[in-house]
Amino acid sequence: MNNRSIIEGGIIAFLLSFLAGIIVVLFLGGISAGFLAVILVGVNWLCLLAGGWWASTRAKKIGLFHGALSGLVYVNISIPLNIFLKNTQELSIPIVLVSLLNSTLWGAIGGFLAERKYKR
């Protein structure tokens, strides 16, 4: 297990998600809030895929595992940040559990895809 690649993957996923979210809101801010939320969820999933991909390619082994753990690192960054920014009205146990599941799943998919692409 390569801890450094897992942490890097989670941080990269978080930074990409943050920057992509800002860009989407700036360029698509005029659309309805419901549609914007759907777009941001899709962007978040792509960033988690990228983080899982990064963790898997850096570790060069067990891509699914490294990708999934990078998704957990992402959640461990984003949820405390939401609590710190006082965005707790939308933060409940079911939402945290779904976030854990989604982040782990999409990170694992990214790691799996990277492992399949670079498998020798």
Image (cartoon, rainbow, N blue to C red):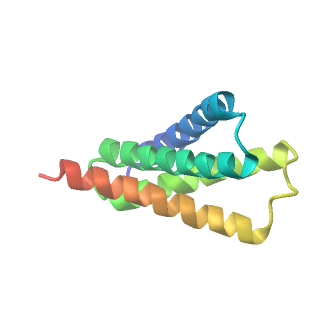
Q: Is residue 63 left or right of residue 27?
A: left
Q: 107 or 55, which lies in front?
A: 107
Residue pictured at 37% horizontal, 46% vertical: 53
27 above or below 11?
Answer: above
- Residue 68 image point, x, y percent: 46, 59
Q: Residue furthest bottom?
A: 94
> Residue at 48% of width from left, 39% of height from top?
8
Q: How far across and down, in percent of the image, does residue 35 sit?
A: 66, 50
Q: Nearer the viewer, residue 31 or 56?
A: 31
Q: Is residue 94 left or right of residue 18?
A: right
Query: Residue 61: image x %, image y %?
Result: 27, 54
Quarter of the figure with residue 58: top left
Find the residue positioned furthest to the left.
120
Q: Nearer the viewer, residue 29 or 59?
A: 29
Q: Residue at x 31, y 59 (%)?
A: 62
Above or below, 14 against 65 in this view is above
User: Total of numbered circles in the picture?
Assistant: 0
The residue sitting at 86% across, 55% down in the picture is 88
> What percent of the width, then of the height, locates residue 52?
42, 50
Q: Quadrant of the N terminus?
A: bottom left
In this image, 69 relative to 33: left or right? Answer: left
